[in-house]
Image (spheres, grey):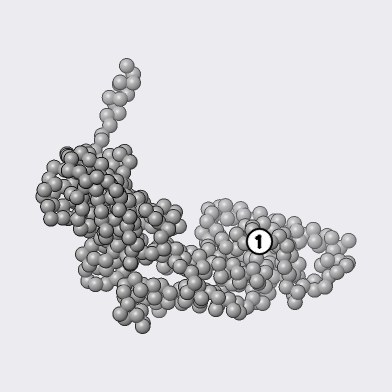
Amino acid sequence: MGVIDVLGNQQQGSVAEGVRDATPEEAARADREAAFHRLADLHIDRSYRLATVVLGDRTEAQDAVHDAFVTAWRKYDSLRDHGRFVAWFDRIVVNTCRDRMRHARRHVVHDLATVPDVAGGNPTAGVPDEIVVRRALQQLAPDDRIVLALRFYRDMKVDDIADAIGIRPRAATSRLHRALERLRRILDEDSTEAAR
Amino acid sequence: MNERDLETRLRDAYRVEAGRADPGALSERVHSIPATVEPERRHWWHRFRSGATRRVGLGRTQVRGANSMFSATRIAAVVAALALGTTFLAVQVGDPPEAVPQPAAPTTDSWAIVTGSQTLVGESPDCWATARNRNMSDPRLEGDVCINWEGDEGGEGLATLWSSITVTNADGSWQGHSVGFMDEQEAHHHTGWFEGHGAYEGLAFIERLTEANPKYPSAGVNMDVVGLLYEGELPPMVIPDWAADTAWDAE
């Protein structure tokens, strides 16, 4: 039985456990909470990992996912088709990450455990490639970072990416292409700098 | 660096980054949200005749058949009502706040502006919504309210709503419809139009209802009412004669 079936049965199954004598409104609230907890358990991990790769900062990602779940809880009744919860919540996570990237502090807090000491000399010498790529990603615009993460971390198709960020598929294709080009340019510049 | 190399480096970087991510205490934070955050949208539930409690019509698309409220006459009534700057209603459940009575002098005129207020709730097994504390300046518009409605939701609070309504008192009843919407603050804006029956035969009433305090955290919708009670029928549909207009312009 899928998630939707579980939730659907819960919502149409009238009364939640332990609230047999509750009013319809109380039972509805209890069902709503149960659905929320279930959805949180199912989606917290994947959402957190997406936020982490988009934001490049685990603490920021925790806050972003928390904020996304707050939004989901507050607006849950506006979700018309519960079968589309995943797409709906992905969009909330993406929007939350975008807002945080736009409005959060300018400087990026690196995880000291993963950033080697590069004081002096070549900034990329001895640095693991994933760190080099991560630094390059952080120089991209928020929308570029989002579209790259959805495509190359989530392996989403262009149509799904377009749906997640609320643009037309053709625009998503263009944005993806531009983001890759920008990333390539940054990495090439870093590589040229390292070769000097 | 070719495209495949770039994509491979990107995927590898993401994989490492995601692999190090551990939600940790995030789960506990997220699960505490319902205890600390009030849902923004109010509950749209009602009890059916069967006794089952379900989410109200939002999410279903109205099938507009022969008995649809969107007949020519009804559309004409809406246009007329909108032209008069009027509106109408919607639903909710729970323990509502008290509606604030509108001061206005009672009247029995055949043409009269009527003001009032009511709190809409969804508590009747026969009606998807009823009204508490209905307080109208004209006693002919007082009575028990029964609303059955439909709606479509557009997300972010936006919704269209339409309904069939009866208002019944000891002398007669008012039977009519409404159409309206909810804005981004989830405030209701509606127009209703009614025909009188019983002692009110030959009278019509067009009203505008707006939600008095849409941000009120409790369930229930407080509505301010203003309308025109008049002797006559609901407005007919306007069918413009464009050809005649063109000829007139040419002269």
Q: Which chain contains the residue that carries disc 1? A: A
Residue B231 in sight here: yes
The quadrant in which the N terminus of chain A is found is bottom left
Seen from the viewer's position, the closer of residues B107 and B226 is B107
Q: In the rendering, at what x and y percent does residue B135 appear?
A: 25, 53
Question: Which amino acid type corresponds to the residue marked 1 in the rendered image?
Answer: Ala
Badge 1 element: loop
Q: Tell me which corner region of the image, top left, top right, bottom left or bottom right, holds residue A120.
A: bottom right
Q: Quadrant of the C terminus of chain A?
A: bottom right
When the figure is inspected, residue A184 is found, relative to residue A86, above or below; the finding is above
Q: How many marks?
A: 1
* Residue at image coords 33%, 63%: B96
Whether residue B184 sits left or right of residue B88 in the image: it is right
Q: Name the residue located 31 percent from the left edge and 69 percent from the top edge.
A: B54
Q: Position of residue A195 (x, y in %)?
A: 86, 63
Q: Nearer the viewer, residue B186 or A101?
A: B186
Tell me residue A135's x, y (percent).
74, 65
Residue carrying label 1 = A104
Q: Is residue B199 left or right of residue A90?
A: left
Q: Is residue A192 left or right of residue A107?
A: right
Residue B167 percent across, percent down from the top left: 20, 54
Q: Mark 1: few, some, or many residues within 10 Å (few <14, many ≥20)?
A: few
- In this view, the residue farthest toward the bottom is A18
The residue positioned 65% from the left and 71% from the top of the image is A59
Q: Nearer the viewer, residue A196 or B3?
A: A196
Relative side of A126 to A54, left or right: right
Note whether B71 is above or below A64 in the view shown: above
Is any part of residue B191 visible from this angle? no
> Residue at image x 29%, y 48%?
B103
